[in-house]
Image (cartoon, grey):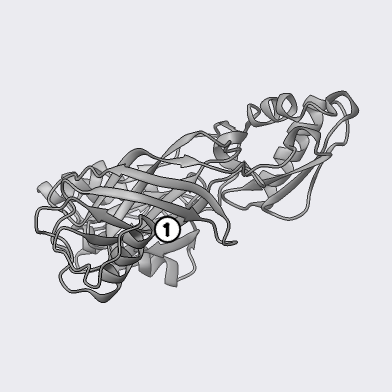
Amino acid sequence: MKILGLFLTFSLIALDAYSVRLKDMASIRGVRENQLVGYGIVVGLKGSGDGKTDYTSKSLQRMLQTLGVSTADATSKNVAAVLITASLPPFARAGNPMDIQVSSIGDATSLEGGVLVQSPLRAANGNIYAVAQGNILIGGDHKTAGRIPNGAIIEKDFAEDFSSRKMFRVTLHNPDFTTAMRVVRRINGDLGGKYASAKDSATVDIVVPATYEGNAVELLSLVESLEISPDLIAKVIVNEKTGTVVIGEKVRISKVAISHGDISLDVGDKKSKGRSPRTVLMDKGASVGDIVDAMNALGVEPKELITILQSIKAAGALQAELEIL
């Protein structure tokens, strides 16, 4: 059956212990993007702009007044009001360009061919950090949103004196006490002293050694390249819509017997006799992966297998967290 083949293909079992660079499993506190937002006017549209939207006409009127043009009616179907969004990269410097996204907020039907007029971009604190302007590029059939590559110029530095900091905080993407302690031991081992300490399952603080004072970039380059073996909880994730099952490496099943229709599952008694052809016999401590393989060999439907896994969990024999999507 095709659906069984698909189910078997996407039943994933984690491999043995592996190592991951710290930079791929954690982030340095303060080293992140900052969101910017702005309001602007797009001109040059071919009759596809806002109609008699009040805020669009008033915005156009104010813009014309700043250019020395006074008018009582600034309504035009060639103009559209838009929101501008962008992500200011870490350590941004004045003069650097960045991409922006532009989205219509009125009743315009298309921004294709439009030009964004100079507009300020603000951070959450209300300060202006960039100015945007340029020709809008539309991709696909969604005509009321587009982007402008390098459409904004950063006007203000958004950074502190990073290299002179005395302490750094590392935040794990997937909090885990065992992983946090492995990070601490690895960092201290490579730095040759007790410089790292775990504050909780997600936070590791690093005190800058005297040999790296004023040279934090070199220190963090060393730290983020360290390879750590992350510890994972035993977990089974089931997607009932697609029949996908993702199985963690440490998932095990205790002794249990289950009957589902003409299917019998017996874990912990592989010597049993007199069973039907649709009987699965396994040793105690069998993995969920073993059960998935056996069930697929019997031609079990994905929904049946999901029901069986749920029943094993309800009986307390599935030694793992079961998450249903």
Quadrant in which the C terminus is drawn: bottom left
Residue for point 10% across, 47% down: 2
Please give the name of the residue rendered at 57% of the width and 50% of the height, measured from the top-left corner: 174
In the image, residue 293 sits, relative to residue 253, either above or below, namely: above
The residue tagged 1 is 38
93 shown above or below 254? above
SS at circle 1: strand
Task: Say if 69 sits above or below 29 in the image.
Answer: below
Q: Nearer the viewer, residue 54 or 194?
A: 54
112 or 245: nearer the viewer: 112
**Badge 1 local density, few (<14 within 10 Å), some, or many (20+)?**
some
Place residue 228 in its image quadrant.
top right
At which x and y percent is residue 87? 46, 47
User: Residue at (45%, 71%) from the top-left corner?
Assistant: 315
- Where is residue 162 drawn, in percent x and y? 73, 37
- Is 251 displayed left or right of 228 in the figure? left
Amino acid at the residue labelled 1 = Gly
Q: Is residue 214 visible?
A: yes
In the shown orientation, is residue 241 left or right of residue 229? left
